[in-house]
Image: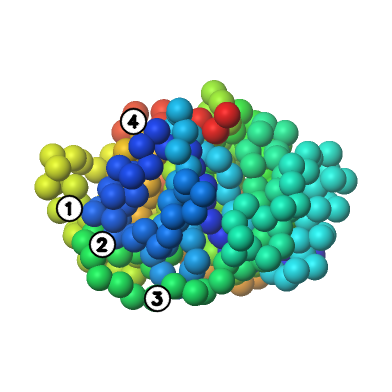
């Protein structure tokens, strides 16, 4: 079976200071605010109606992750398959007025996914403003107490394909129908949550602009730049207000064969196998390894 999800749809977070987070994303990442709706701030980096939705809350955390279905029928299939897998269906009402059809379910650990019809492309593709200007939000890496079960549930409900995993399922990377090495991933942690949210850029040159923007506020990168082994993508990481860890990537590996066997990699003790984590050799700092942003209450 082909994956029922085409690509990442949107990411919705809770923030104690939505205006600050949205402004920081404008100044550093280079996204822009495209709308305000019922107290939410809608953010996009391209023509898509919204890629990132910020809700005001008492605590910073991940609310839900939107995944674009390959067809309207695929939303119904996800509803049926999630139910068959014993996962809880939370809603069939779309989270935004712009979304035509969706189903929202939770994994057994409580990660919330809204599989929805494609976001309308009703914004200007290009826009003025500071920051490095990503192409799109491209993947999310979650934290899970049991990443093996998480991967099995995502395969059962949405047909995600396991592109790669480490020997002990410390990290699992899964691909959608668009063939990116990973659209969702999960790293083993003490609690369910999100490790990082990734934005794709056109070129490595854009990373320089982002790093220089951080220096204007005496901030620094958390890890990188480098090139991951899993996914073969260029990367760097920095923290945004509220503690959200953002990754910036370019050149993600594409896999067009649904039947390609899952790659299994030895991560080494504490992710010390540099050929898996960073082909250029610099290992992740403790701050990156231990990072965890909780799920919203
Ligand atoms: Fe990533």
Question: Label 3's element?
Answer: loop
| Residue bearing the label numbered 1 | 213
- Residues tagged 3 and 2 counted as in contact (Cβ below 8 A): no
Mark 1 and mark 4 lie on one chain; the one further toward the N terminus is 1
Mark 2 and mark 1 lie on one chain; the one further toward the N terminus is 2
Q: Is mark 4 within 8 Å of ligand 1?
A: no
Q: Is residue 52 above or below residue 293?
A: below
Q: What is the crowding at mark 3: few (fewer than 14 residues within 10 Å), some, or many (at least 20)?
A: few
Mark 4 and mark 2 lie on one chain; the one further toward the N terminus is 2
Residue 135 appears in the picture as rendered: yes
Mark 4 vs mark 2: in front: 2
Q: What is the crowding at mark 4: few (fewer than 14 residues within 10 Å), some, or many (at least 20)?
A: few
Residue 147 relative to residue 21: left or right: right
In what quadrant of the picture does the N terminus appear? bottom right
Quarter of the figure with residue 180: bottom right
Residue shown at 28% from the left, 48% from the top: 24
- Residues tagged 2 and 1 counted as in contact (Cβ below 8 A): yes
Q: What is the crowding at mark 2: few (fewer than 14 residues within 10 Å), some, or many (at least 20)?
A: many
Q: Nearer the viewer, residue 86 or 270?
A: 86
Mark 1 vs mark 3: in front: 3
Q: CA distance from mark 1 to mark 4?
A: 21 Å
| Residue bearing the label numbered 3 | 124
| Residue bearing the label numbered 2 | 132
Q: Is residue 107 above or below residue 132?
A: above
Q: Which mark is residue 287?
A: 4
Mark 4 vs mark 3: in front: 3
Mark 4 and mark 3 lie on one chain; the one further toward the N terminus is 3
Q: CA distance from mark 1 to mark 3?
A: 24 Å
Quarter of the figure with residue 8: bottom right
């Amino acid at each position: 079976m082909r994956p029922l999800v085409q690509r990442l749809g949107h990411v919705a977070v809770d923030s104690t200071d939505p205006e600050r987070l949205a402004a920081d994303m404008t100044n550093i990442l280079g996204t822009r605010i495209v709308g305000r709706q019922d107290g939410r701030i809608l953010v996009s980096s391209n023509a898509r109606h919204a890629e990132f939705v910020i809700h005001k809350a008492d605590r910073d955390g991940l609310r839900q992750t939107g995944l674009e279905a390959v067809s309207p029928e695929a939303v119904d299939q996800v509803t049926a398959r999630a139910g068959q897998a014993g996962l809880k269906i939370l809603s069939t009402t779309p989270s935004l007025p712009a979304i035509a059809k969706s189903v929202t379910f939770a994994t057994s650990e409580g990660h919330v996914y809204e599989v929805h019809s494609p976001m309308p492309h009703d914004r200007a593709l290009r826009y003025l403003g500071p920051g490095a200007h990503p192409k799109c939000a491209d993947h999310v890496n979650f934290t899970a107490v049991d990443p093996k079960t998480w991967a099995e549930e995502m395969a059962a409900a949405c047909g995600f394909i396991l592109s790669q995993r480490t020997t002990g399922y410390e990290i699992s990377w899964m691909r959608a129908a668009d063939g990116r090495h990973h659209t969702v991933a999960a790293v083993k942690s003490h609690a369910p949550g999100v490790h990082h949210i990734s934005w794709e850029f056109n070129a490595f040159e854009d990373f320089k602009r982002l790093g220089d923007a951080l220096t204007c506020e005496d901030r620094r990168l958390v890890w990188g730049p480098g090139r991951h082994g899993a996914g073969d993508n260029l990367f760097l990481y920095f923290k945004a207000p509220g503690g959200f860890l953002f990754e910036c990537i370019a050149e993600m590996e594409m896999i067009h064969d649904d039947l390609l066997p899952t790659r299994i990699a030895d991560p080494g003790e504490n992710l010390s196998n540099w050929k898996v984590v960073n082909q250029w050799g610099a290992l992740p700092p403790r701050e990156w390894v231990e990072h965890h942003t909780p799920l919203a209450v």
